[in-house]
Image (cartoon, coloured by chain):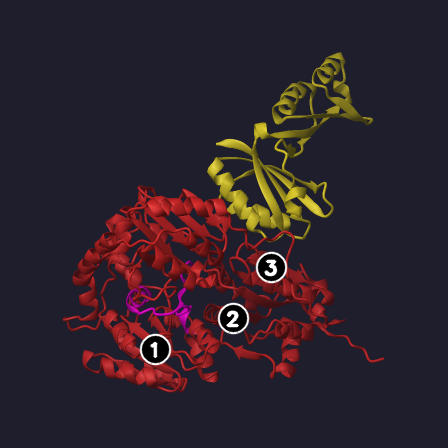
Amino acid sequence: MKDSRIRGAEIVIKSLVAENSEYIFGYPGGAIMPVYDALYDYADQIKHVLTRHEQGAIHAAQGYARVSGKVGVCMATSGPGATNLITGIADAMIDSTPLVCITGQVASPLLGTDAFQETDVVGFSMPGTKWNIQVRRVEDIAPAIAKGFHIARSGRPGPVLIDITKDAQNALGEFNYVPCLGIRSYRPYPKVNENSVAKAAEIINQAKRPYVLYGQGVVIGKAEEELKAFLDKSGIPAACTLLGSGALDEDHPQYVGKLGMHGNYAPNMLTNKCDVLIAIGMRFDDRVTGDLKRYAKQAKVIHLELDNAEINKNVKCEVSILGDCKESLPLLTEKLKEKSHQDWLGEFRKLEEKEKSAVVSLDLLPTKTGLTMGEVIRYVNDFKKDDAILVTDVGQHQMIAWRYFKYKTTRTQVTSGGLGTMGFSLPAALGAQLADLNRQVICVVGDGGIQMTIQEFGTIMQTQSPVKIVLLNNNFLGMVRQWQQLFFDKRYSFTELDNPDFVKIAEAYNMKASKVTERDNLRDTVAEMMVHDGPYFLEVVVEKEDNVFPMIPTGCSVEEVRLS
Amino acid sequence: MNRYTISLFTENFIGILNRVTLIFTRRGVNIDALTASESKEDGVHRITIEVTTTEEQVIQIVKQTEKIIDVIKSFYYKDDEVVYQEIALYKIPISSLDPGLEKVIRQYNARIISAEKEFVVIEMTGHKEDTKALLEILKDFSILEFARSGRVAVAKPMGTIEQYLNN
């Protein structure tokens, strides 16, 4: 009889195929070579993207996961390959991004001996992963992968890491893939408590100035329609967090803007004027709340949240509704009275006008000579489709792009929110594009961040991903410089950059590239970029020392949001 | 700051203790004592951790331990909500054996569990305050070695992990 056993390495690939994984973002090396060898025969069933650094691989997997809603897969070898994933793991953990990271490991007899490229990646990644495991036996490979996918995508998603020793990859075993449907010790979807829902509805129905804050939980829970139905019936004004952007069409009549340190003026100010605060799938990050001691103290807080550890963590709530908001929102909506809050909404609009004249018009329709980041985004808006995806890095450009990009539909926002990882955007944009080749992907990046992962130009070209890269170049680490200006007496300690010729770099990778320094050709060049069939790099030289406003300085209350 | 007992019911997998203690480390909460054992349920492991901190911290820590995939359920209790016990061993040189020691052993309900040529080992179970009091006294008897276990505890409230598992 023919031996039906196959190598562990092939089991890895077949397991990924069984999970319908479309892409592996990875980088080969000694301890993962058997898996790469097996992969050679599966090119028709699963695609592999060779990034130029393992950090690029994991950020690409994150971009892919955020746009597709599926689990992103990345792969690296042992030692440095594995440790290069750590930043992305931490990023995916804090931003709830589902990932399965597979790392090769030295053969099990060598474990603990400081063998070549041995590192305790399970130990390294233990506090940063949702779950991790080291597999040393071939028969444990498929069950570990099945469990990993289940954990990564269910409940509050997150990264898992599966470390597989080389001897397990080489050993022969039977392949019999059984998807993981549940784990005794893990209950990802707590049952919604109807009493809490009733109590919340009662409070909302009596509210005079209720206010909704929505976050990425709505996107992860695919509850965009449920959110809209809730708002339509209740008439409550709604503001979003950084990662919640896109969950609601910004043209919705009750949409009032963005929260947080560089969010909009009205949503921050009026947080301390509402009587009921309804937080949906968000975690009251310090960048949203400012000083907690002076945050919404007058309001009764209702928190709809899937992760029990987030409830009462930062903000104490009157009622918590633990569970998936896809399930809890309709239950709540059903119990609400139909209402409109025009006067209350009017207060937001009034403050919005104030922000428009003090900040927005100067950003979008500048009269000074230097180009602003805001006007670049304005032109991007002119040529983008509703479902275009904005991928940003970290810093001033991120906040400006977020403020002015027009979010019309869901899964259009890919950025490093919680961790603030510079270098995230270029590889994440690649992953985002591969998740959907029919959607426009615009990567907005600063001159600091782009140089952290600039080698991924190579991957973008090799995959011919038609990403539009917009570099907003102020020759500064702009956000740090802004803080130095405002809070460190203009002592610009190590924030100015002598930059290379970015266009030449892009061209060296054979990428179509242009550079804009004057307002006159900005619009046309953005237009050219947006219709270009293929990857495109656009550098815009912007005003060197522009600041992002509004701003809530660290330690200040949301009411102390500054317009200048 | 109060003393709390945290009871975790977990799967018995490699690294579980590491995962649990990382949460305490991250929040800068010191573990006063820790014990691990099997539980009544087959395959369910229990870890008992004693900490001195605020109730707010304990609540957060308990919730975060519950996020660990292999943790089935975590509980926390104030001292009056658990029945707990610790065991202490005292190694005393033979030369210290005298009627005074016998009196102390009786008074503290302790017992000699091992007698060797050069020393005896006294055992006492009780709360930390009691075993510590005996330690202080035995210092006058030239005590050679002292060791105390972490707390083992059962909860006074009647809900059980079994009910949770079957729910």
Label 2–label 1 contact, CB within 8 A: no
Residue pictured at 51% horizontal, 47% vertical: A193
Chain B, colour shown: yellow
Q: Quadrant of residue A548?
A: bottom left
How far apart marks 1 and 3 lie (CA) works out to 39 Å
**Color used for chain A?**
red
| Front-most of residues A174 and B109 | A174
The amino acid at mark 1 is Lys
Judge from the rendering whether residue B26 lies leftward or rightward of residue A274; answer left or right.
right
Horizontal and vertical percent for residue A141? 68, 66
Label 1 or label 3, whichever lies nearer to me, is 1
| Residue with the mark numbered 1 | A385
Which stretch is magenta?
Answer: A398-426
List x then y, in percent, for residue B110. 73, 21
Would you name the residue on which mark 3 appears? A132
Report the amino acid beneath label 3: Asn
Foreground mark, 2 or 3, reads: 3
Looking at the picture, tell me which residue is in the foreground, A284 or A219: A219
What is the chain letter for disc 1? A
Report in which chain the residue with disc 2 lies. Answer: A
